Amino acid sequence: MSASSEPRPIAPADHITQAWWDATRQRRFLLQRCVTCGHRQHYPRNICTSCGGTELTDDEASGRGTIYSHTTVRRAPHRAFAPPYVVALVRLEEGPVVLSNIVGIEPGEVRCDMVVRLTWEDLPDGRKLPMFTGER
Amino acid sequence: MAARAPVIAGAAEGSLGVTGKTILELQAEASTAALADAGLSMREVDGLFTTAVSRWNASQVAEYLGIYPTWFDSTMAGGSSYEIFVAHAAEAIRAGRCEVALISYGNNQRSARSRKLGGVIDEHAPDAQFEMPYGPLNPISLYAMAAQRHMHEFGTTSEQLAEVAVAARAWALRNPKAFKHEDGPLTVEDVLASPLVSDPLHALDCCLITDAAGAVVMTTAERAQDLPKRPVQVLGHGETTTNVGMSQIPDLTATGACVSGERAYAMAGIAPADVDVAEIYDSFTITVLLELEALGFCARGEAGDFVTKGRVAPGGDFPMNTSGGGLSYTHPGVFGIFLVIEAVRQLRGECGDRQVADAEVALCHGTGGILSTHSTVILGIDR
């Protein structure tokens, strides 16, 4: 999917998101949990979107989820991408929804509510990018 | 009408299509035309509402026009910005903060070739780290996923989506200013035969990319008594914002229009059945289906059926997007002002071949970003 010539466009991490990106090096997908109300959220921030609490901690996601919706992209938005490929919203079993790619499944076989699991693509700098694939 | 009730006194387009003009030039053209329509002069403008110009937005436009407004607003809410401006101008007029509000838009994206499939990426925004690495087309892929989910939940079909584009073209054939006016009718088969861009959306499920400029002038009901055109009243409005990132949308098939619509209806004291003509942002065919449901014109999941059998086309019992919409009339990045201009013309009875008979209540709904921002404005006229 990712043509080798050019890396994917990824904006630099900041001090709020650095720990999340660092954890990807160990293939760990961190999810924030609010210490006050237990709400889980992704992407990382310094405030709970449910109760406004400011004490947040990280749990590791199980990596299991279901496809909320999906689309096969037919035209490349950037030279890093080689269509067709599948972009999807995946609802993690812990609750948060993430945007990702579905890999290892033919685009025509992807369905809403399909169960998927986490997999990782290596990035040039040693970090890894979470993606989703069919259940084992 | 109360003396300070806000009304629309003037509305006009500037150049449309492929203009080769600058954004500020387009803004000046449309503003001049709308003020002439209102019978007011640039010197009388004390409120300015505009966005998508530059970092300085209203200040930049004020400087170019040579005015010194004492009330201005450059809220950037994508496609719904201009319904929001009508609402904010209405409140400012009601509160006595301004007397003559100019709401102006101009964009040269087709001439300037400034539109990109991947959209504009703000490096510091969370989606630049967590979403753009996956290569979604922005905004198309989010609307595509909303369509996919709508199909999954409710059995909506690509043929039903295509009906929205087919009806828009039929209206455009009655609008001499429409970009596709000379292109002849469109069929469901034509839409389905156009290339898929981001499944299930085809090229013809997507709005045009054009230049265009438009402006609206608002003032008080009292002032409008001395002006040439019959005043169009702002009966109600509502707005909300739900997300910027694709992953952050609360629900793909129940949009923020549920909230903005409810607030607008309550303020106007009307129900969906009271609307004579609807101008609903058609960035994509799916946008219209989602907003028809959210605005209460049909039940959730039923918009696919609702738009079939020519109901939203000329002669149908639900006149919608009567200019030809973003799909066949014009779409300069932010279409919202053109929803208002068409609604004003319908209420005044100026629409010729596409006139909706005896229209007294019009609803405009702007949708911006990736189903991110929603603003509903309800307009009316005394007959």
Image (cartoon, coloured by chain):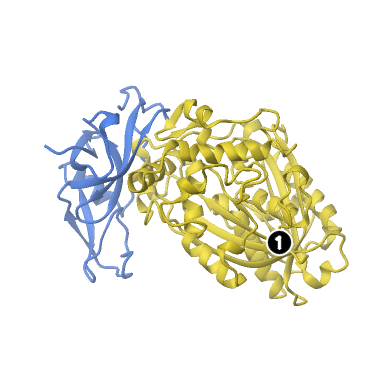
Chain colours: A blue, B yellow
Residue extending farthest to the top is A5
List x then y, in percent, for residue A30.
Answer: 20, 51
- In the rendered image, the quadrant that contains the C terminus of chain B is bottom right
B87 w.r.t. B206: above or below: below
Element type where label 1 sits in the image: loop
Q: Amino acid at mark 1?
A: Glu
Q: In front: A55, or B273?
A: B273
Q: Is residue B114 left or right of residue A127?
A: right
List x then y, in percent, for residue B6.
Answer: 72, 69
Q: In front: B162, or B283?
A: B162
Q: Residue at x 78, y 53 (%)?
A: B349
- Judging from the image, mark 1 belongs to the subunit labelled B
List x then y, in percent, for residue B57.
Answer: 64, 52
- In the rendered image, the quadrant that contains the N terminus of chain B is bottom right
Q: In front: A60, or B382?
A: B382
Q: For mark 1, what is the residue?
A: B360
